Image (tube, grey):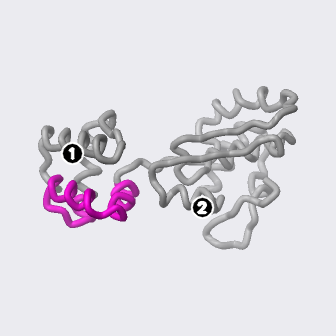
Amino acid sequence: MLSLRQEEIQVFLEGLKLNFSLDFTQYSEASVIRRLSRVCEQLECEDLEELTQRLEFDSNLLIEFLDQFTVNVTEMFRDPLFFQKLLPFLEKDINKDYSIWHPGCSSGEEIISLAILLHRAKKLQYCTFTGTDLNEKVLERATKKWVKRRHISDYQRAFSQVTGDFDLLQYFEDDHSQELRLKKYV
């Protein structure tokens, strides 16, 4: 593992903030050290100075850096209590259009969750969604509305906790591949 000093990490993070408008200064120190060490190893950089120079001269490398450095956590119906508290609002009459923005959407499972709930409440036609994320790779995945099959049993449990329904798969096309895709009508 790469040995990193606190002062060089701070210089690197301030450089990201200044040069790329990316502020990771609030990340935990242990997480930053672990992620930067891994990134340097993956990109074959001897130190943060080399990584900085390469990032400044290669815009494609910034995309790769963000893919490896950022935390891409998302899951359907993550925090079921939040979605349970949202249900009464969704039951109310919606007689106008709503735009829903989800910053840091990663690959979009929370957006898919909300779309399913809005579909169930017959309100989806009034809503448009915008998802944004620093990581272009996961954002591209989000536009495809795929869910990994290996996670579906966990998602089913959370969905059941929120809705009392046990058939999450009804909202997905199933071609028996490793991924499920959200049905077009949802």
Give me the C-alpha separation between circle 2 and circle 1: 35 Å
Is residue 140 rendered to the left or right of residue 121? left
Q: Quadrant of residue 88?
A: top right
Q: In what element is the residue under mark 1?
A: helix
Task: Report whether residue 61 is seen.
Answer: yes
Instruction: In the rendered view, tell whether residue 174 sits above or below residue 76.
Output: below
Image quadrant in which the N terminus is located: bottom left
Counting from the top left corner in percent of width and height, residue 153 is at 64, 54
Percent of width and height locating residue 117: 76, 41
50 drawn magenta: yes
Residue type marked 1: Phe
The span picked out in magenta is 40-68
Q: Position of residue 139 (x, y in %)?
A: 54, 55
The earlier-in-sequence mark between 2 and 1 is 1
- Residue 18 lies within the magenta run: no
| Residue with the mark numbered 2 | 148
